[in-house]
Amino acid sequence: MFKGAAIVMGVASCGKTSVGEALAKLLGAHFTEGDKLHPAANIAKMSSGTPLNDDDRWPWLAEIGKALGGSDGQIASCSALKKIYRQRIIEAAGRPVAFIFLDGSRALLEQRIADRKGHFMPPALLDSQLKTLEPPGPDEWALRLDIAQPIERLVQQAAEFLQRSLGHG
Protein backbone atom coordinates (compact mmCIF):
# COMPACT_ATOMS: atom_id res chain seq x y z
CA MET A 1 0.00 0.00 0.00
CA PHE A 2 1.26 3.47 -0.94
CA LYS A 3 2.19 5.55 2.12
CA GLY A 4 3.67 8.57 0.36
CA ALA A 5 2.35 11.89 -0.89
CA ALA A 6 1.90 12.93 -4.50
CA ILE A 7 0.41 15.74 -6.56
CA VAL A 8 -1.04 15.18 -10.02
CA MET A 9 -0.24 18.52 -11.67
CA GLY A 10 -0.64 20.45 -14.89
CA VAL A 11 -2.72 23.13 -16.57
CA ALA A 12 -6.51 23.15 -16.85
CA SER A 13 -8.09 20.13 -18.56
CA CYS A 14 -4.96 17.97 -18.57
CA GLY A 15 -6.76 15.27 -16.56
CA LYS A 16 -5.53 15.91 -13.00
CA THR A 17 -8.72 14.82 -11.27
CA SER A 18 -9.36 11.76 -13.45
CA VAL A 19 -5.78 10.50 -13.14
CA GLY A 20 -5.54 11.42 -9.45
CA GLU A 21 -8.75 9.62 -8.48
CA ALA A 22 -7.81 6.48 -10.44
CA LEU A 23 -4.25 6.54 -9.08
CA ALA A 24 -5.44 6.89 -5.49
CA LYS A 25 -7.87 4.01 -5.96
CA LEU A 26 -5.18 1.79 -7.47
CA LEU A 27 -2.70 2.57 -4.68
CA GLY A 28 -5.19 2.53 -1.80
CA ALA A 29 -4.53 6.20 -1.02
CA HIS A 30 -6.81 9.09 -0.13
CA PHE A 31 -7.56 11.59 -2.92
CA THR A 32 -8.05 15.34 -2.47
CA GLU A 33 -9.46 17.45 -5.30
CA GLY A 34 -7.35 20.60 -5.07
CA ASP A 35 -9.91 22.79 -6.82
CA LYS A 36 -12.33 22.14 -3.95
CA LEU A 37 -9.86 23.79 -1.54
CA HIS A 38 -9.93 27.13 -3.37
CA PRO A 39 -11.54 29.91 -1.34
CA ALA A 40 -14.70 31.41 -2.83
CA ALA A 41 -12.82 34.58 -3.81
CA ASN A 42 -10.41 32.58 -6.00
CA ILE A 43 -13.26 30.75 -7.73
CA ALA A 44 -15.08 34.03 -8.36
CA LYS A 45 -11.92 35.60 -9.77
CA MET A 46 -11.23 32.70 -12.14
CA SER A 47 -14.90 32.43 -13.13
CA SER A 48 -14.76 36.06 -14.24
CA GLY A 49 -11.78 35.25 -16.48
CA THR A 50 -9.17 36.88 -14.25
CA PRO A 51 -6.04 34.79 -13.58
CA LEU A 52 -4.98 34.24 -9.99
CA ASN A 53 -1.80 35.90 -8.77
CA ASP A 54 0.69 34.51 -6.28
CA ASP A 55 -1.00 36.22 -3.32
CA ASP A 56 -4.26 34.49 -4.27
CA ARG A 57 -2.52 31.12 -4.45
CA TRP A 58 -0.44 31.01 -1.23
CA PRO A 59 -3.28 30.11 1.19
CA TRP A 60 -4.68 27.59 -1.30
CA LEU A 61 -1.30 25.90 -1.76
CA ALA A 62 -0.90 25.70 2.03
CA GLU A 63 -4.27 23.91 2.28
CA ILE A 64 -3.22 21.42 -0.39
CA GLY A 65 0.06 20.79 1.42
CA LYS A 66 -1.79 20.22 4.70
CA ALA A 67 -4.04 17.69 2.96
CA LEU A 68 -0.90 15.73 2.01
CA GLY A 69 0.48 15.67 5.56
CA GLY A 70 0.58 12.74 7.92
CA SER A 71 1.80 9.24 7.23
CA ASP A 72 -1.02 7.77 5.16
CA GLY A 73 -1.02 7.57 1.38
CA GLN A 74 -2.22 10.91 0.01
CA ILE A 75 -2.71 12.04 -3.57
CA ALA A 76 -4.05 15.45 -4.58
CA SER A 77 -4.74 17.32 -7.78
CA CYS A 78 -3.24 20.79 -8.12
CA SER A 79 -2.00 22.84 -11.04
CA ALA A 80 1.31 23.46 -9.14
CA LEU A 81 2.42 25.59 -12.09
CA LYS A 82 5.60 27.10 -10.63
CA LYS A 83 8.52 25.53 -8.80
CA ILE A 84 7.94 27.90 -5.86
CA TYR A 85 4.35 26.61 -5.63
CA ARG A 86 5.59 23.03 -5.48
CA GLN A 87 8.09 24.02 -2.78
CA ARG A 88 5.31 25.65 -0.74
CA ILE A 89 3.21 22.48 -0.99
CA ILE A 90 6.12 20.34 0.21
CA GLU A 91 6.77 22.71 3.14
CA ALA A 92 3.11 22.63 4.17
CA ALA A 93 2.96 18.83 3.83
CA GLY A 94 5.95 18.37 6.09
CA ARG A 95 7.17 15.40 4.07
CA PRO A 96 8.46 14.63 0.58
CA VAL A 97 5.91 15.04 -2.21
CA ALA A 98 6.20 13.51 -5.68
CA PHE A 99 4.75 15.31 -8.70
CA ILE A 100 3.06 13.63 -11.65
CA PHE A 101 3.14 16.27 -14.41
CA LEU A 102 0.43 15.76 -17.03
CA ASP A 103 1.65 17.50 -20.15
CA GLY A 104 0.09 17.77 -23.57
CA SER A 105 -0.14 19.71 -26.77
CA ARG A 106 -1.91 23.05 -26.80
CA ALA A 107 -4.40 21.69 -29.37
CA LEU A 108 -5.37 18.75 -27.15
CA LEU A 109 -5.67 20.98 -24.07
CA GLU A 110 -7.87 23.46 -25.99
CA GLN A 111 -10.11 20.63 -27.18
CA ARG A 112 -10.48 19.23 -23.68
CA ILE A 113 -11.19 22.58 -22.05
CA ALA A 114 -13.81 23.39 -24.71
CA ASP A 115 -15.50 20.02 -24.08
CA ARG A 116 -15.55 20.42 -20.29
CA LYS A 117 -18.90 21.39 -18.78
CA GLY A 118 -19.69 22.87 -15.39
CA HIS A 119 -16.19 23.95 -14.35
CA PHE A 120 -15.33 27.45 -13.14
CA MET A 121 -12.16 27.72 -15.24
CA PRO A 122 -12.97 29.44 -18.55
CA PRO A 123 -11.03 28.47 -21.71
CA ALA A 124 -9.51 31.96 -21.89
CA LEU A 125 -7.36 31.23 -18.82
CA LEU A 126 -5.48 28.41 -20.57
CA ASP A 127 -3.08 30.99 -22.07
CA SER A 128 -2.38 32.41 -18.61
CA GLN A 129 -1.67 28.95 -17.20
CA LEU A 130 0.61 27.97 -20.08
CA LYS A 131 2.52 31.23 -19.67
CA THR A 132 2.92 30.65 -15.92
CA LEU A 133 3.88 26.96 -16.20
CA GLU A 134 7.39 26.01 -15.09
CA PRO A 135 7.68 22.28 -15.84
CA PRO A 136 9.40 20.32 -13.07
CA GLY A 137 13.16 20.23 -13.49
CA PRO A 138 15.64 17.41 -12.99
CA ASP A 139 16.18 18.54 -9.39
CA GLU A 140 12.54 17.79 -8.53
CA TRP A 141 10.93 14.45 -7.68
CA ALA A 142 8.66 14.36 -10.71
CA LEU A 143 7.48 12.32 -13.67
CA ARG A 144 6.26 13.90 -16.91
CA LEU A 145 3.49 12.03 -18.73
CA ASP A 146 2.00 12.76 -22.16
CA ILE A 147 -1.77 13.16 -21.86
CA ALA A 148 -2.30 11.84 -25.39
CA GLN A 149 -2.01 8.36 -23.83
CA PRO A 150 -5.07 6.51 -22.50
CA ILE A 151 -5.86 7.29 -18.87
CA GLU A 152 -5.22 3.68 -17.85
CA ARG A 153 -1.68 3.93 -19.17
CA LEU A 154 -1.10 7.26 -17.41
CA VAL A 155 -2.29 5.80 -14.10
CA GLN A 156 -0.13 2.69 -14.51
CA GLN A 157 3.00 4.73 -15.32
CA ALA A 158 2.36 7.04 -12.36
CA ALA A 159 1.82 4.10 -9.99
CA GLU A 160 5.02 2.41 -11.15
CA PHE A 161 6.98 5.64 -10.69
CA LEU A 162 5.63 6.19 -7.16
CA GLN A 163 6.17 2.60 -6.07
CA ARG A 164 9.67 2.51 -7.58
CA SER A 165 10.77 5.76 -5.95
CA LEU A 166 8.83 5.60 -2.68
CA GLY A 167 11.92 6.01 -0.56
CA HIS A 168 12.97 9.05 -2.58
CA GLY A 169 12.64 12.50 -1.09
Image (cartoon, grey):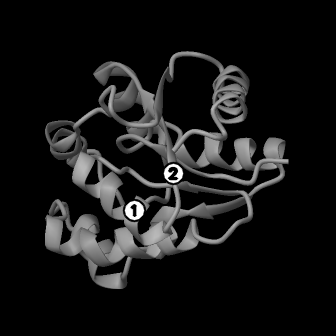
Residue found 63% across the figure and 46% down from its top = 20
The dot on residue 89 is 1
3 or 125: nearer the eye?
3
Question: Among all residues in the image, which is located at the extreme bottom?
Answer: 40
Give residue 144's position: percent from left, percent from top.
Answer: 45, 25
The 10 Å Cα crowd at callout 1, few under 14, some 14 to 19, many 20 or more, is many
The dot on residue 160 is none
49 or 38: nearer the eye?
38
Amino acid found under the numbered disc labelled 2: Val
Q: Say whether residue 166 is left or right of residue 16.
A: right
Residue 128 lies in what quarter of the image? top left
User: Does residue 63 sit above or below 53 in this rendering?
Assistant: below
Give residue 105's position: percent from left, percent from top.
Answer: 34, 19
Residue 73 lies in what quarter of the image? bottom right
Query: Would you say residue 82 is visible in this rendering?
Result: no
Residue found 19% across the figure and 64% down from its top = 52
Amino acid found under the numbered disc labelled 1: Ile
Residue found 71% across the figure and 42% down from its top = 23
Q: Secondary structure at mark 1?
A: helix
Q: Secondary structure at mark 2?
A: loop
The dot on residue 97 is 2
125 or 6: nearer the eye?
6
Give residue 37's position: percent from left, percent from top.
Answer: 47, 74
